[in-house]
Image (tube, rainbow, N blue to C red):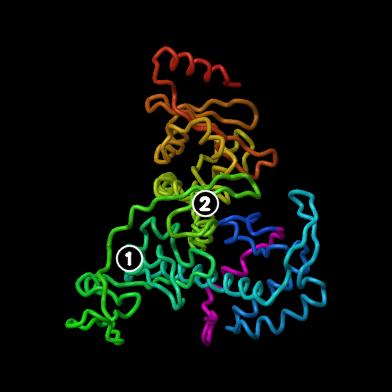
C-alpha cells in the first residue's frame, strides 16, 4: 500500500524533513537510529549530488502528496543518467575492498520512498500529539494494512497507553522495515469506552459449526480487550558488524528502529528553546534549569545529539572567566566521560549543578575555569568557558568522598586551586 498524504500535507512532517541535514553513507548501518531524525541518507549514495537529487524528489513527494509511481517515474531517469542504477562495483570505505553492490532499482526506490514518508508522517504526528495531549492524553497502537503482520506487532495491537509513557520512545510507529502499524490519539472518554468494549480484533474470526466442529467458511468481526499497562519488554543483543558496537534491541523493533523520530527532533528543539529561556530569565532561571534537568536529562542521555542546557550562572561569575553568556551547557562528550568516571550518579542528582552554582563556594582555577564546592550536600561542579567566551560548559560533576578524612583533604586541595 502506497503512502500518500491527501490534500494539504501536514506542515509538521514537511518541516521536520526539511530541517534534516544530509549525510552520505555506504551502508544503512553507517547512519544509526536517531541520526536518521537529523540527517537524510541513502545507502551507497556517497556523492552529494546523487543524495541531493533523491532528497529533492522525496521533498516534492511529501509536499505534493505524490504517489510512489510518480516519485519513481521522475527520479529514475535522473539516477540512470548519472550512473546510479543497477549493480556496480564500489569500494567500501570501511574495509577498502571493492565489491559489487546494488545502486538504484525500483525496489530500492520504494524502500526510500516509504521509509521517508512514514518517518516524516510519524514525526509530524508526534508534534501534533504533544500539542494536543491535554485533551487527547492516550495513544492506541493499531496494526496497519499489511497482509502479514509480525507476531510481536500483533501482540501490541490494542495497547492503550498515556502519550508520555516511555514505550513510545522506542516503539512509536513505524518501528521496523516496512512496518505499517500506526497509533491513534484517544481522549479520556474514549479511553474509558475502549476499556469497557475493547477494540476490533486484528482479523475476523472463523465461524465454527457447533455440531461438526468444522469451519463454516464465514467470518465475523470480533473485539479484543485493550491493555492499559506497558508490557515488560525484553531486549536482544545485536552486533552492528560495520562498527563492532553491541546494541540492545527491544522486543518488537528492528535494529536501528527503536527510536521516536518526532521525539528526537522535538527534544532538540525544546532544549534549544529552554536554553534561550534560561539565559534570558531573571530570578526564576534556576527553577527552570532544575525542572528541565529533573524531567528531561535522562531522556536526552539515551541518545545525546546536541548540548543540554544544564544550569545558569550569574553575570559576575561568567565575566570572571570571560564568558559572554550565562548559560552552562552539558556536552555529549562530557556525558560520556561522566558515565565512565561517575556511573554512581543518578540523573536527578545533576540538579545539584545549579545548586552548586547558586549556593556553593566559588573557586577560580585559572583564567577560564570556576569550581563550585557545595560542601554541605557533598558535590563539586566545574564550569569552563571556551576560548572565544561564546559558550560555557560543565566539564565535571561529582560527589565528595563519603570518608570524612578523604573529604576534608579533598576540600583543602580544592581551595588551594584558588588563583
* Mark pair 2, 1: CA separation: 35 Å
Which residue occupies 79% across, 66% down?
88
Q: Which residue is mark 2?
A: 275
Q: Left or right: where does residue 214 sit relative to residue 23?
A: left
Residue 160 belongs to magenta span: no
Counting residues from the start of the chain, the first of labels 2 and 1 encountered is: 1
Residue 58 occupies quadrant? bottom right
The quadrant holding residue 141 is bottom left
Give the secondary structure at mark 2.
helix
Q: Nearer the viewer, residue 274 or 350?
A: 350
Q: Is residue 292 left or right of residue 71?
A: left
**Which residue is located at x 32 percent, y 72 percent?**
186
Numbered circle sitting on residue 159: 1
Q: Is residue 307 above or below residue 173?
A: above
Against 184, residue 417 (above or below) is: above
Task: Identify whether 251 is placed above or below 344.
Answer: below
Image point (79%, 50%), residue name: 96
Q: Which residues are magenta?
A: 1-26
Please tell me in which quadrant of the rendered image residue 78 appears.
Answer: bottom right
Extreme residue toward the left, this view: 211
Amino acid at each position: 500500500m502506497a503512502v500518500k498524504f491527501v490534500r494539504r500535507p501536514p506542515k509538521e512532517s514537511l518541516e521536520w524533513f526539511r530541517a534534516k541535514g544530509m549525510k552520505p553513507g555506504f551502508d544503512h548501518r553507517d547512519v544509526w537510529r536517531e541520526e536518521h531524525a537529523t540527517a537524510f541518507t541513502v545507502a551507497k549514495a556517497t556523492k552529494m549530488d546523487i543524495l541531493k537529487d533523491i532528497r529533492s524528489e522525496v521533498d516534492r513527494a511529501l509536499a505534493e502528496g505524490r504517489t510512489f509511481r510518480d516519485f519513481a517515474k521522475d527520479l529514475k531517469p535522473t539516477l540512470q543518467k548519472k550512473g546510479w542504477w543497477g549493480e556496480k562495483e564500489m569500494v567500501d570505505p570501511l574495509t577498502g575492498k571493492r565489491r559489487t553492490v546494488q545502486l538504484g532499482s525500483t525496489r530500492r526506490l520504494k524502500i526510500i520512498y516509504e521509509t521517508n514518508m512514514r518517518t516524516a508522517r510519524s514525526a509530524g504526528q508526534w508534534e501534533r500529539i504533544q500539542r494536543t495531549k491535554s485533551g487527547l492524553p492516550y495513544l492506541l497502537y493499531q496494526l496497519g494494512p499489511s497482509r502479514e503482520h509480525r507476531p510481536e506487532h500483533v501482540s501490541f495491537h490494542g495497547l492503550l497507553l498515556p502519550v508520555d509513557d516511555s514505550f513510545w520512545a522506542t516503539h512509536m510507529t513505524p518501528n521496523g522495515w516496512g512496518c505499517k502499524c500506526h497509533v491513534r490519539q484517544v481522549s479520556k472518554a474514549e479511553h474509558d469506552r475502549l476499556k469497557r468494549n475493547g477494540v476490533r480484533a486484528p482479523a475476523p474470526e472463523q465461524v465454527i459449526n457447533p455440531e461438526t466442529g468444522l469451519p463454516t467458511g464465514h467470518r465475523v468481526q470480533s473485539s479484543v480487550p485493550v491493555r492499559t499497562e506497558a508490557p515488560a519488554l525484553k531486549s536482544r543483543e545485536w552486533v552492528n558488524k560495520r562498527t563492532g558496537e553491541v546494541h540492545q534491541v527491544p522486543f518488537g523493533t528492528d535494529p536501528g528502529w527503536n527510536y521516536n523520530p518526532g521525539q528526537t527532533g522535538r527534544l532538540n528543539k525544546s532544549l534549544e528553546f529552554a536554553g534561550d529561556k534560561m539565559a534570558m530569565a531573571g530570578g526564576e532561571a534556576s527553577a527552570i534549569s532544575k525542572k528541565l534537568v529533573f524531567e528531561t536529562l535522562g531522556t536526552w542521555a539515551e541518545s545525546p545529539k546536541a548540548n543540554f542546557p544544564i544550569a545558569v550562572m550569574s553575570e559576575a561569575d561568567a565575566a570572571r572567566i570571560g564568558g559572554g553568556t550565562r548559560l552552562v551547557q552539558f556536552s555529549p562528550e562530557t556525558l560520556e566521560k561522566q558515565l565512565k568516571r561517575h556511573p554512581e550518579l543518578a540523573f536527578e542528582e545533576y540538579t545539584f549543578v545549579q545548586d552548586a552554582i547558586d549556593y556553593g563556594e566559588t573557586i577560580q582555577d585559572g583564567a577560564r575555569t570556576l569550581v563550585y564546592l557545595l560542601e554541605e550536600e557533598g558535590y563539586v561542579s566545574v564550569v569552563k568557558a571556551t576560548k572565544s567566551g561564546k559558550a560555557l560548559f560543565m566539564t565535571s560533576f561529582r560527589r565528595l568522598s563519603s570518608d570524612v578524612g578523604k573529604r576534608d583533604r579533598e576540600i583543602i586541595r580544592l581551595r588551594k586551586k584558588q588563583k
